Amino acid sequence: MNVNLWRRCETLFKHVAHCCSSISKSPDSIRSVGCGRYAFSRPPVSYSVQRYIHLQSVCQANKSQSVTDVSVSQSTDVKKSREIVEAVNTQINSEDLGRLFAVVHVAGFQRKVTVNDIIVVETSSYPSVGTRIRLEKVLLVGSKDFTLVGRPLLSRSVVNIEATVIEKTLSPMVLSFLMVRRRRVRKLRMQKTQQVVLLINSIEVNSLED
């Protein structure tokens, strides 16, 4: 019983493979494919072929109009960007920015800062106390009316943030205890990390270039 069923399935698979190969060779000219009782008829042009022809015609029509559409969209985008840049430059030159804020990348972390803020950075690579430094990695700067976002960073000519090292100290004691059961392992570790305290002196924004 199983042998007969297997033979029938094998014969059916062969007929289906033959039909598929015939269809792939000439999809428009074949009206009847197959052999024996598994033969079937199909229209000269199938729905998939009609859909393909329709999509091709639509794509060609869109392609013929794409050049003008793209040029118009680019011109409108350029006009909008220029208007935005002019509005931002007008706001910057008016010196009515309010309190500026910025997001800076310091020692592997992002910090939101404003003028006269004090931030604590866990690192020992900063210079001595009293040194004035410039924060180079500025991700964002904003005011009450606009916000400038870098991709990923803002240019040095656009924003200038300066800070002063006011203290170099150690963090509070951190205790870490390790115990392994039935191994007689008991380890107590006390650790302090070096910290640098920075005072944000100024955040300046310059005019944008077209």
Image: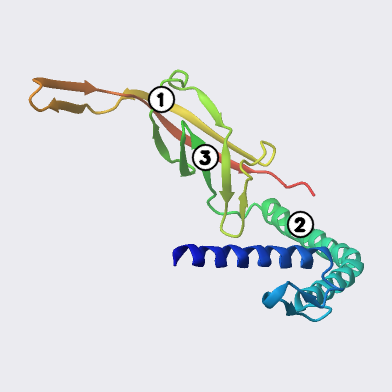
Check the picture and name the quadrant holding the N terminus: bottom left
Q: Secondary structure at mark 1?
A: loop
- Looking at the picture, does residue 83 appear above or below residue 57? above
Residue 19 image point, x, y percent? 73, 68
Residue extending furthest top? 128
Residue 88 lies, with reference to residue 29, above or below; the image says above
* Residue at x-position 52% and y-position 26%: 132
Q: Look at label 2 and name its amino acid.
A: Glu
Position above or below: 143 against 63: above
- Mark 2 highlights which residue? 86
Circle 2: element type:
helix
Task: Write down the residue under mark 3.
Answer: 104
Q: Nearer the viewer, mark 3 or mark 2?
A: 3
Q: How far across and how far down the image is residue 85, in percent?
A: 74, 55
In the image, 121: left or right of 53? left
Q: CA distance from mark 3 to mark 1?
A: 16 Å
Q: Earlier in the sequence, mark 3 or mark 1?
A: 3
Residue 148's label in the rendered image is none
Q: Nearer the viewer, residue 69 or 16?
A: 16
The residue carrying pointer 1 sits among few (fewer than 14), some (14 to 19) or many (20 or more) residues within 10 Å by Cα, namely: some
Q: Nearer the viewer, mark 1 or mark 2?
A: 1
What amino acid is at disc 1?
Answer: Thr
Q: Quadrant of residue 185?
A: top left
Residue density around tag 2, few if under 14, some if 14–19, many if 20 or more, within 10 Å: some
The residue where tag 1 is placed is 123
**Label 3 crowding class (10 Å Cα cut-off): few <14, some 14-19, many 20+?**
many
Quote the CA–CA distance across marks 1 and 2. 41 Å
